[in-house]
Image (cartoon, rainbow, N blue to C red):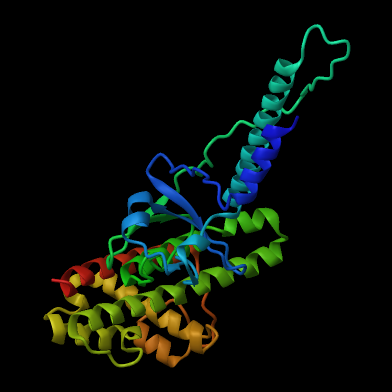
Amino acid sequence: MFKNLQKELRRLELTTEISVPIEQDPEGFYDKECPSEQCYFLFKIHGDDWSEIVRDEEVFCPSCRHSAPAKSWYPRAQLKAARDYVLGTIANSMNRAMRADVAASKRRQSRESFLSITLDAKGGRNAVLVPVKAAEPLRLRTICEACGCRYSYVGAAYFCPSCGANSADHTFKQTLNTIRTAASLGETLRATLNPDEAEVIAQALLEKAIQDAVMSFQRLSEQLYERRTGRSPRRNVFQNLDSGSELWRTEIGRGYSDLVDASSLRKLRIYFQQRHLLAHQQGIVDHDYVDRSGDKFYNLGQRLIIRKIAVLEFADLIESLCTKLMKNANS
């Protein structure tokens, strides 16, 4: 009486996998998620590159550089949708088997029989099976300089998911984006926190942005120098504008004064010295700051006050210098 159902149950016992179709987004990217519980960073990889460039043995998180085999990178939301798809597939196969048993039972019954026993199946509506949908395309897209893998993300990403390479140029741009975002958070903080807390946090973010800009410039300059010469520069040489400029003049025949105008270089000198003051003197103005920066705005013993407009200007100046430096160092 339950011949088809029993047959289907035996088939399911022998089934080791059920294929679940997963869609690409409209731009051809697959959704991925870092499997590290401390990260769960969401990103996308172009479908062709996932098949042709990315290795099955190892994929890297663009945010934290956690590594794991390719099969480990399905987003949690997709895994849940895939489980629903599998359960729906099984339910549909069971429904078909039971309906087949019902139909067979009715065919075996004789209309002239004094007593008839038939099966009936109610409910058991088939699940609608659709491919696991992709999330909407992500805003930021990049191509790895080392292996050519195309990937996209939201927020900040520092490593190629295919080869794990850290692009100095890419990281520099990410840091500038973060700096500009941090500089603009003051209004939001003042609207959500009490005035004292908002001002303290906003000022801390601005001061950190000044320091991050110099550190990012240093890191980019070091990688450009190592790539060009095959040698490591002296430690922290690019935190000092004069020393870094002379090193580049020796190597490429051009210093910073040849790459940006005098006004920009004068402002950069002030911001670099402010970074030094924030990092080593808690922002308190001393003789060295006055002598090296040429900044006449502050008196000795005063503390620096960093404004949004200054951070945004510094980010623009740093970006302009680095763009010209990369062009010359890579030529």
Residue 252 lies, in percent from the top left, at: 13, 80
Q: Is residue 208 above or below residue 128?
A: below
Q: Is residue 25 above or below residue 200?
A: above
How many discs appear? 0
Q: Quadrant of residue 213?
A: bottom left
Q: Is residue 126 left or right of residue 60?
A: right
Q: Quadrant of residue 152?
A: bottom left
| 223 or 11, nearer to the observer | 11
Q: Is residue 28 above or below residue 301?
A: above
**Residue 260 in sight from this viewpoint:** no
Residue 173 lies, in percent from the top left, at: 37, 64
| The residue positioned farthest toward the right in the image shown | 114
Q: In what quadrant of the picture does the C terminus appear?
A: bottom left
Q: Quadrant of residue 318?
A: bottom left
| The residue positioned farthest toward the top in the image shown | 112
Q: Is residue 2 above or below residue 19?
A: above
Residue depicted at 69% across the width and 22% down the height: 104
Residue 136 lies, in percent from the top left, at: 48, 42
Residue depicted at 18% across the width and 75% down the height: 329
Q: In what quadrant of the picture does the N terminus appear?
A: top right
Residue depicted at 52% across the width and 38% down the height: 131
Q: Is residue 90 left or right of residue 268?
A: right
Q: Is residue 282 left or right of residue 173?
A: right
